[in-house]
Amino acid sequence: MTELWNALLAPDLPFLRYALITGLLASIAFGVIGTFVVVRRISYIAGAISHCVLAGIGGGLYLQNVVGISWITPVRGAVLVALLAALLLAQVSKNGDQREDSIIGALWAGGMSIGFLFIAVTPGYFDPMSYLFGNILLISKEDIYFVIALDGVILFVVGIFYNKLVALCFDEEYTQLRGVHTHWLYLLLLCLTALTIVLLVRIVGIIMVIALLTLPAAIAGHTASGIRQMMLFATLFSALFIITGLGVSFSFDLPSGSVIILLAAACYLFSLVFKGKRSRN
């Protein structure tokens, strides 16, 4: 970790400072939205959205480099596809006559396939591994602004609809009976999840996006006494995993995303053991 702090102070290594700042700011989104994802038990839906993101990234690369539409960047393409996937999944959930698991599987595999096809037909070399497994060290100053905006939107929306979102996660039928339009509320939650996933892809990649979105919140759920406390603990755990993962990966020259997820998974397993012993006692 000492090497990381020394490198952070080096004027010729701004990408490390960008990575650390982005990780700390992103922990807010991960902690808040991850809590809702865990409590509502929509991890598989989040996984489907995350894999659809590759279609947006590949489509953005193709439109930018082949068609010549410069304003459609891979990140903007990812945001658009993620929101469309959230809209589709919310619509499927509203229509109970359709098998939600089949739609999730189709989006999961179809999004990945479309993304790889777009990358394959785009001239030049584009490494899909950076999208699949992420690289927080490629974060730019513009990404920091995106994270700040995302945090602001999430905190604003959750602050307004907090009670309704909590009610939706615990008892959707009761919430609907109280006159709340649960379909639109669920769509709002999925859209916020989709935006958070796009940010996660930049840090840990598409393959491991579900882990960082759910593991800190799951660990927090073992110790928190309420939803607000769970969000706070999940945010702190996310920040801890990102900072520690950056330090370990930088010291031993390892992929940062994989190290971050490995730390989160190890802490989650430890929390399960600790919870089991406490329950027996």
Image (cartoon, rainbow, N blue to C red):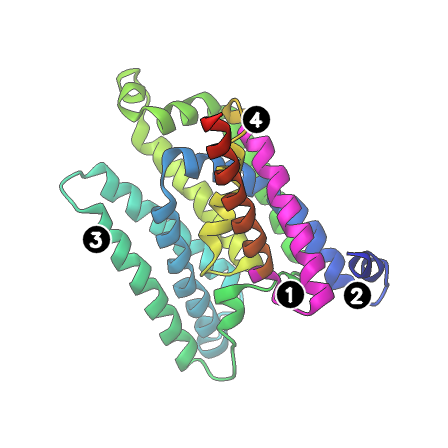
Quadrant of the snapshot with the N terminus: bottom right
Q: Tell me the quarter of the picture where residue 188 sits.
A: top left
Q: Of the residues under marks 1 and 3, which one precedes in the sequence?
A: 3
The Cα–Cα distance between marks 3 and 2, rounded to whole angstroms, is 46 Å
Residue 178: horizontal and vertical position, in percent?
A: 30, 15
| Residue placed under numbered mark 3 in the picture | 102
> In screen coordinates, is 120 left or right of 34?
left
Q: Residue furthest bottom?
A: 124
Residue at 56%, 45% (x, y): give it: 267
Tag 2: residue type?
A: Leu
- Decide if residue 60 is in sight here: yes
Q: Residue furthest left?
A: 97
| Residue placed under numbered mark 1 in the picture | 138
Say few, some or many: other residues with alpha carbon within 10 Å of mark 2 (under 14 / 14 to 19 / 20 or more): few
Disc 3, SS: helix
> In screen coordinates, is 110 left or right of 210?
left
**Magenta-colored span:** 230-258
Q: Which mark is residue 13?
A: 2
Say few, some or many: other residues with alpha carbon within 10 Å of mark 1 (under 14 / 14 to 19 / 20 or more): some
